[in-house]
């Protein structure tokens, strides 16, 4: 190809308005420094000295953390792939792609949802002989296998249907849901395929409900005999079946080759640690290397179906670009969510992260690997270091793959050979989990693996198409959401303390901007203490009538006002720019507070316990399916509490404390009849702070005292939190 004909397969654009942003953040920085100066210069000599120093520490932390946040906004870049150029240049000479779907628990992740995801990725618009789909079932459930078996039969009709009518999205359940908006669509073929799907759905759902596979299916398929020696989810042999394969002459109803489809439940033994999802992924990497050995690996969570049948081609544009492609280790797409309500009460869409911050990470060459919707180069995932020799000759890559396949005689042999790769003992004395594959020992195995890849000299790319590539579910109760954030922040903080810490290990290996950006996420947990301090102490001092902030007539009031107002308005505008609503921002602010005062605190405590050897990592899968009335409340955007847990009790206590302080102060004013003008003059910021906290917490007061539904806060929480908050207020006033 002549140099003049060369067109890149993707394009990178820089964000606009950077200079404006830098000037604005510099002005805020000056404001923050002035606040620090004020705190240092007015430390009281005796009374309240330590309280004051506490505030100074909190403000130092907030300033520092704000500084980290800036890195994510300095240099955003945007990517645009050109899949038509890819098709022109390569035609069907495309590399093999292996797709990994991971599921762990058939109760929390219903098999029908899992197979919808599987069907959606099998139906990619991609040469089927180059596509292989692997389902890793850490639940080792025969019902999940049964569902996959059903899916493999249904796929023979579904795939041709998708291609004939070019339908989108290709998850059957999502597709039939979109049809509900066109009620007059009753084409014969559509009705037939819909009926076929519904039959399958009811069989699978009946089996899930009963927790067992129908008798006649059991006897008809010899594969189920493997569950004969099965004793429990945590103690069984490897179960591996190739359900669809070219060697078996798997063809659809039009006679076309089907994608390869494999079920894997890796061996589990109580005496071996299974390393959660990282362990499952590593088994899949090895097993797939034997069966299909695709150069590109896509991994998705079992609740994230593909919403765009072109995504593989889009992602390949990055890897296969002649000029820059060889540096790229992985292409991350954002998580899209299909069940976010208009004002997103739990901030579940992670809007700011995916629509603002990840572009900034991309600017430094290193978006996070977030464990789903991510395309990897296989060799990099297996631990390869970056060098100039890492270029892949994409035009010839498939020949070697095909050779590799032919060596194996029969499918049985292939299954037997692959099984040994998923055994418990395989990884003993190897570098799997340490240097190769996904890393072990961290709750967010994905992020730490991504970081270790970047430290080996690779780059990653963030690709965020307007039409989302993958759609999943986000938590629909407050507690689920808080637990999810606890897990994330715990894992993120583990990374700081780990061998791969972005602070020291990554130093010199990745750019300082990327180090800062990683720290912004890794240090989530530490925000809990300054935030707790700020939401308790100023309110208690308000009750006592002692000012902790400059009064309105003082020149020191200006930096406080500027920083608070400036940053809030900036955040609000940013949120609205990426498609949020004002109410959504207010909800986001509430979640910001709740995450910091509960999730992050528990994450930090758990981390410390672990460091001192007290408890083991316990991975909590977040529930993905909601009960009936829970989802009704969710759709009405009413916060779901419903449980008495330490997290919710803590939040309720903080809410009550702020209410008592504010009301107590107002009562004192009225009863004692002091001129309230002076109060607002001397303590305006404290009044505002308490006031805002009370406003944010309105849903908690409603949940404690006004609501009657099942999602309210339990009585016991009301009693505990009120008692606790009241005693703190009384004690504090009495002591002071
Ligand atoms: C599933 O169970 C329902 C009732 O529980 C029954 O009406 C239906 O026929 C069953 N479906 C299949 C496919 O067995
Ligand atoms: C999912 O895909 C459909 C088309 O199939 C599109 O209309 C929709 O906007 C996509 N959803 C998201 C969230 O991008
Ligand atoms: C599982 C779940 O909660 N799904 C819900 C997601 O949200 C949509 C509408 O917002 C509901 O229809 C689903 O039931």
Image (spheres, grey):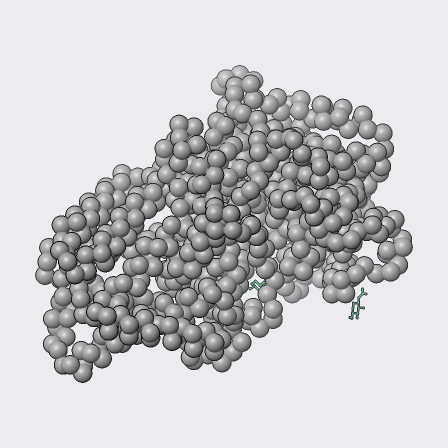
Number of marks in the rendered image: 0
Q: Quarter of the image holding residue 676?
A: bottom left
Instruction: Please tell me which residue lies in front, 644 or 686.
Output: 644
Position of residue 349 relative to residue 717, above or below, is above
Residue 464 located left or right of residue 529: right
Name the residue rendered at 76%, 36% in the picture: 420
| Image quarter of residue 550 | bottom left
Q: State left or right for residue 574 relative to residue 258.
A: left
Residue shown at 43% from the left, 41% from the top: 496
The quarter in which the N terminus is drawn is: top right
In percent of width and height, residue 681 lies at 13, 67
Q: Position of residue 296 (x, y in %)?
A: 62, 33
**Nearer to us in this view, 210 or 53:** 53
Q: Residue at x 79, y 51 (%)?
A: 230
Q: Position of residue 488 (x, y in %)?
A: 49, 50
Q: Nearer the viewer, residue 736 or 414?
A: 736
The structure residue drawn at horizontal position 71% and vertical position 37%, both measured from the top left corner, is 425
Q: Quadrant of the C terminus?
A: bottom left
* Residue 347 percent coordinates (x, y): 45, 58
Looking at the image, residue 395 lies above or below residue 478: above
Q: Is residue 274 above or below residue 52?
A: above
* Name of the residue lying farthest toward the bottom: 671
Report if residue 588 is visible in the image.
no
- Determine the quadrant in which ligand 3 lies: bottom right
Most distant residue in the top direction = 2
Q: Is residue 713 visible?
A: yes
């Amino acid at each position: 190809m002549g140099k003049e004909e060369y067109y890149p397969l993707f394009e990178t654009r820089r964000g606009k308005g950077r200079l404006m942003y830098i000037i604005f953040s510099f002005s805020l920085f000056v404001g923050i420094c002035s606040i620090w100066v004020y705190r240092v210069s007015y430390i009281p000599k005796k009374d309240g000295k330590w309280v004051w120093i506490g505030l100074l520490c909190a403000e130092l932390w907030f300033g520092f953390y704000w500084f980290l946040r800036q890195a994510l906004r300095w240099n955003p870049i945007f990517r645009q792939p050109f899949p038509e150029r890819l098709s022109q240049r390569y035609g069907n000479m495309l590399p093999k792609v292996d797709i990994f779907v991971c599921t762990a628990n058939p109760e929390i992740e219903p098999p029908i949802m899992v197979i919808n995801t599987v069907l959606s990725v099998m139906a990619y618009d991609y040469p089927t002989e180059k596509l292989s789909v692997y389902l890793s079932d850490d639940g080792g459930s025969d019902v999940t296998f049964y569902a996959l078996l059903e899916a493999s039969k249904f796929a023979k009709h579904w795939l041709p249907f998708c291609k004939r009518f070019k339908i989108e999205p290709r998850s059957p359940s999502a597709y039939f849901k979109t049809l509900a908006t066109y009620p007059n669509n009753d084409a014969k073929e559509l009705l037939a395929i819909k009926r076929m799907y519904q039959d399958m759905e009811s069989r699978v759902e009946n089996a899930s409900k009963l927790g067992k596979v129908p008798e006649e299916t059991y006897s008809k398929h010899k594969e189920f005999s493997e569950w004969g020696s099965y004793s429990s989810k945590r103690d069984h042999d490897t179960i591996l079946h190739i359900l669809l394969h070219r060697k078996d002459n798997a063809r659809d109803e039009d006679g076309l080759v089907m994608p390869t489809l494999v079920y894997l439940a890796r061996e589990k033994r109580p005496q071996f640690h299974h390393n959660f999802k990282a362990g499952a992924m590593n088994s899949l990497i090895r097993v797939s290397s034997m069966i299909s050995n695709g150069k590109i690996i896509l991994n998705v969570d079992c609740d994230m179906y593909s919403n765009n049948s072109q995504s593989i081609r889009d992602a390949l544009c990055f890897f296969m670009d002649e000029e820059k492609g060889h540096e790229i280790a992985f292409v991350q797409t954002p998580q899209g969510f299909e069940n976010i309500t208009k004002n997103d009460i739990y901030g579940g869409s992670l809007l700011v992260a995916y629509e603002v911050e990840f572009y900034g990470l991309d600017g430094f060459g290193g978006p996070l690997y977030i464990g789903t919707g991510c395309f990897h180069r296989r060799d990099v995932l297996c631990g390869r270091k970056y060098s100039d020799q890492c270029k892949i000759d994409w035009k010839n890559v498939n020949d070697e793959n095909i050779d590799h396949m032919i060596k194996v005689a029969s499918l049985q042999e292939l299954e037997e050979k692959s099984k040994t790769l998923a055994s418990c003992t395989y990884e003993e004395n190897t570098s799997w989990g340490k240097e190769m594959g996904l890393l072990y020992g961290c709750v967010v195995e994905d992020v730490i693996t991504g970081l270790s890849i970047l430290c080996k000299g690779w780059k990653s790319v963030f690709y965020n198409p307007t039409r989302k590539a993958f759609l999943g579910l986000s938590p629909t109760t407050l507690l689920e959401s808080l637990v999810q954030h606890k897990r994330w922040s715990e894992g993120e903080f583990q990374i700081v303390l780990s061998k791969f810490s972005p602070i020291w290990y990554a130093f010199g290996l990745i750019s300082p901007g990327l180090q800062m950006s990683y720290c912004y996420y890794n240090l989530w947990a530490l925000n809990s203490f300054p935030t707790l301090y700020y939401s308790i102490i100023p309110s208690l001092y308000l009750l006592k009538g002692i000012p902790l902030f400059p009064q309105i007539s003082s020149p020191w009031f200006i930096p406080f006002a500027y920083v608070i107002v400036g940053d809030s308005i900036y955040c609000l505008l940013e949120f609205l720019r990426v498609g949020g609503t004002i109410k959504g921002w207010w909800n986001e602010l509430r979640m910001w507070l709740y995450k910091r005062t509960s999730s992050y605190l528990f994450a930090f405590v758990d981390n410390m316990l672990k460091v001192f050897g007290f408890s083991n990592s316990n991975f909590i899968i977040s529930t993905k399916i909601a009960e009936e009335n829970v989802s009704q409340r969710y759709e009405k955007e009413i916060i779901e509490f419903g449980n008495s847990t330490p997290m919710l009790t803590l939040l309720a206590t903080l809410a009550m404390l702020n209410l008592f302080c504010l009301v107590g102060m107002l009562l004192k004013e009225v009863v004692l009849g002091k001129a309230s003008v002076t109060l607002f003059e001397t303590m305006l910021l404290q009044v505002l702070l308490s006031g805002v906290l009370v406003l944010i917490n309105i849903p908690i007061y409603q949940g404690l005292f006004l609501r009657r539904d099942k999602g309210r806060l339990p009585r016991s929480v009301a009693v505990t939190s009120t008692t606790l908050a009241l005693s703190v207020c009384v004690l504090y006033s009495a002591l002071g």
